[in-house]
Image: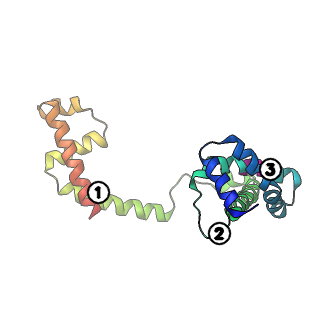
Amino acid sequence: MPTQELSDLIGRVALGDRAAFRLLYDKTSAKLFSVVLRILRDRAGAEDCVQEVYVKIWNNASKYTVSGYSPITWLAAIARYDAIDRIRAAKNQAVDVEDIAEFASDAPDPEAISVGASEMRRITFCLDELKPDHAAAVRSAYVDGYSYQELADQYKMPINTVRTWLRRSLQSLKACLER
């Protein structure tokens, strides 16, 4: 099928044209099936994969852009990547979950501990740049879980003032952390 015709069909598919999609399938499915079968080496798996590939083509036809390449190259790339993803997924399923559970730990690894400590130092530094009562309000609200009303009662201030404090304090913290 000529390149221009395939491009036109993909464009019509992007607009939701089911007849164009059916024609695109008829004209390209044998080619895509051979690409997938070559990778998967399993006829049933290849048939399933090609069905999923055409669902992806239907959903992503609007992302196709005419370039110097043949549209069949774009279609084959989708098929190829989907087949490769299936192989990777099959390899990942081969690991017995029971074996992993013995070695898994909920404790953070050394890198996570280091990153967490570094972030904590940055946050503490930025909190120290705020007025002491604003920093305490931020800690009470976002660490201890106090409500706006509880903070308003604690500071003997209107609730809207407390909200403003917190909003401005968070903006200052964000600016500080972005530096």
Residue 68 vs 141, above or below: the answer is below
Determine the CA span between mark 3 and mark 2.
21 Å
Q: Looking at the picture, how far across and down is residue 27, in whole percent?
A: 79, 54
| Left or right of 117, for residue 81 | right
> Which of 59 and 18 lies nearest the eye of the viewer?
18
Amino acid residing under circle 1: Ile
Residue 21: in magenta span: no
Residue 144 vs 36, above or below: the answer is above
Residue 52: in magenta span: yes
Amino acid residing under circle 2: Tyr
Which residue in the protein does label 2 denote? Answer: 69
- Nearest to N terminus: mark 3 or mark 2: 3
Determine the CA span between mark 2 and mark 1.
50 Å
> Which of 9 and 83 lies nearest the eye of the viewer?
9
Which residue in the protein does label 1 denote? Answer: 123
| Helix, strand or loop under label 1 | helix
| Left or right of 62, for residue 55 | right
Residue 59 vs 86, above or below: the answer is above
Which residue in the protein does label 3 denote? Answer: 26
| Helix, strand or loop under label 3 | helix
Please give the range of residues in magenta: 49-53
Q: Are marks 2 and 1 in contact (CB under 8 Å)?
A: no
Please tell me in which quadrant of the rendered image residue 34 appears: bottom right
| Left or right of 64, for residue 3 | right
Residue 154 appears in the picture as rendered? no
- Nearest to N terminus: mark 3 or mark 1: 3
Determine the CA span between mark 3 and mark 1.
59 Å
